[in-house]
Amino acid sequence: MESPTGSSTGGLASGARGNATPGGSRSYSGSQSGGIGAVVSQQKVEKNRFQANIRAFVDHLFIAQPAARWDYKQSFKAPRNAHVTHHVIQSFHAAYGGSYERIEHGLGVYFSSLKAKHRTTDDKAMMKQQRDRRRARRIKKAAGRRKVFDYAQYPFLPADFDAQLCFVPSAMSPEHTDDDGEVKVGGLPWRSQTFTKLFRHLDTLRPKRTVRPTNPNLNSDALPLPDVPSFMLDQAYLAIERTYQPHDSEDDIEMGTSSDEAGSPSGSTVYM
């Protein structure tokens, strides 16, 4: 690792000395102006080198001493992180010198970068966890309805009815968990009322079910998957011309913006 403190740039004043003109002002030759630019450029290079050395030192130290890492859920000035920072400053200074203020500033910059990266990772993990829970609910809902379904009991169903295509997670209403932890459902505009009522009835036959409040504001605007049977689609929905936009089936399964009580007023309930 190069010396983190870099070279001194204190020669700017002497290097920038100009020539006096008869009018009392100073003018600079092209070579002198270029010299100022070179000094400024060198300062930037040295600053970037110093910050790179800070990053490398911190990474190596945190690998060697995992217990001495920052807590990214707290601020840089929080007591625990301040203790870690003090330890890093002392270690860096002992190895490479440099002012304590400059080292602390460099550590603050790197801490902010690591905290932003850590926050992004946590957000992605949380979103994946939410999608997995929503997907699990829809799979459970599809399996529960399929288990109590008997085709012979529903003569109104079309002759080409195929349970393999109808009892799939993407045809079940996804759900949202609000800020209070309550699970709510919305509506699937593309699904016909016949199948919405069928699924609602099948829910009453299931031995174990959880009542969920509905929220019409959570109606999904997602289009049905290409393999959804046409007889499951609402005729009014089909009458409106739409441009199909391909989307990931996993995203469709995991979206938390619809329900089995399509069109029901707020405050009514459905069965999971």
Image (cartoon, helix red, strand yellow):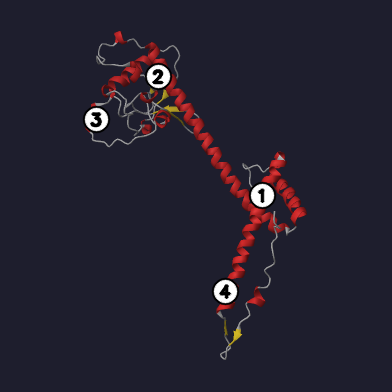
Of pointers 3 and 2, the one earlier in the residue sequence = 2
Give the amino acid at mark 2: Ala
Residues marked 1 and 2 touching at CB (< 8 Å): no
The local crowd at label 2, few if under 14, some if 14 to 19, many if 20 or more residues have their Cα within 10 Å, is many
According to the picture, the residue beneath numbered tag 3 turns out to be 238
Where disc 1 sits, the SS reads helix
Real-space Cα separation, disc 4 to disc 1, in angstroms: 33 Å
Of pointers 4 and 1, the one earlier in the residue sequence = 4
Q: Is residue 154 left or right of residue 75?
A: left
Which of the two discs, 4 and 3, sits closer to the camera? 4
According to the picture, the residue beneath numbered tag 4 turns out to be 34
Give the amino acid at mark 4: Gly
Real-space Cα separation, disc 4 to disc 3, in angstroms: 71 Å
According to the picture, the residue beneath numbered tag 2 turns out to be 142
Real-space Cα separation, disc 3 to disc 2, in angstroms: 24 Å
According to the picture, the residue beneath numbered tag 1 turns out to be 56
Real-space Cα separation, disc 1 to disc 3, in angstroms: 60 Å
Of pointers 1 and 3, the one earlier in the residue sequence = 1
The local crowd at label 4, few if under 14, some if 14 to 19, many if 20 or more residues have their Cα within 10 Å, is few
Real-space Cα separation, disc 2 to disc 4, in angstroms: 73 Å
Of pointers 4 and 3, the one earlier in the residue sequence = 4
Give the amino acid at mark 1: Ala
Give the amino acid at mark 3: Leu
Q: Quadrant of residue 159?
A: top left
- Classify the position of the C terminus by image quarter: top left
Where disc 2 sits, the SS reads helix
Task: Name above or below for residue 232 compared with residue 77.
Answer: above
Q: Is residue 221 left or right of residue 256?
A: left
The local crowd at label 1, few if under 14, some if 14 to 19, many if 20 or more residues have their Cα within 10 Å, is few
